[in-house]
Image (tube, rainbow, N blue to C red):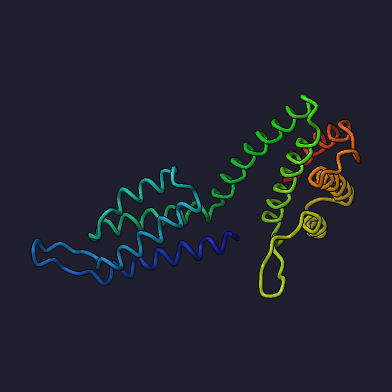
Amino acid sequence: MKTQDLLNRVDFLINNGNTALSNLKYSSYDSSKYVETGQYTGFRSACLSCIAGLFGESHSYYKEFSREVNNSYDYNIQSGVAILQSIRHEIEQGWLTSLRQLVSAEVFSDFLEMGKHLLDEKYKDPAAVMIGSVLEEHLRQLCSNNSVDIEIMKGTDRIPKKADLMNSDLVKAGAYGVLEQKNVTAWLDLRNRAAHGKYSEYTIEQVQLMYQGVLDFITRIR
């Protein structure tokens, strides 16, 4: 999802919160101000879903929102809107993208280390599949970073682009050059051979070269 789409989604939730605050009810029991139950429940559920999708349920934003927006009083909703505004600021400043890239880099490193371990143990076939999967996910992130669509229309459905198409589209977008494109094509071909059981069509030495090449590629091209 693009940054502007994320901002639009958070703005929608902020507006919902502000709308709720402009239509408060007054308790005859203690003169407190509150939001109607249905409006409160809808606001809380939608916000928690959004925050979980952006940061995960273990993030402090999710925990703080869940703790602060635990009732329908006006101050609960005000706390929720304030948290959403902080989240909006992070998205606008690009910090969310930086966080995702950092986490992805750690995940990539873990999977590449697993691929290297498989190679060291002479398991060339699962190593080729794992390294190729890391490469494909990196291509997908490069598409997001370079405003290249990662989906195509097929009839009335949007389906994920294949790695080869992302590769060529990234070259057109100037993310990297033709030489890198040829290397990526060769690595993807090796991954596909491994995934389809064509184990005799490549050697462990070629997978070792693939590992070194992919490691260098994802380090240099971001």
Give the farthest residue toward the right. 201
Please provide percent x and percent y for residue 52.
46, 51
Q: Residue 53 placed where, x, y %?
A: 50, 53
Depth check, front residue: 64 or 162: 162
Image spot of residue 69 (x, y percent): 30, 54
Q: Quadrant of residue 210?
A: top right
Q: Residue furthest top?
A: 121
Q: Nearer the viewer, residue 75 or 191?
A: 191
Q: Can you say which quadrant of the picture contains the N terminus? A: bottom right
Residue 4, x across and y down, in percent: 56, 63
In the displayed structure, would residue 142 be above or below residue 156?
above
Q: Quadrant of residue 45?
A: bottom left
Who's the residue at 31% across and 48% down the image?
67
Vertical position of residue 216 compared to residue 145: above or below: above
Q: Residue drawn 65% across and 33% down?
A: 110
Name of the residue lying farthest toward the bottom: 156
Q: Residue at x 53, y 60 (%)?
A: 6
**Viewed as shown, does residue 89 lie left or right of 139?**
left
Instruction: Determine whether, in the image, residue 19 is placed left or right of residue 5.
Output: left
Q: How many marks?
A: 0
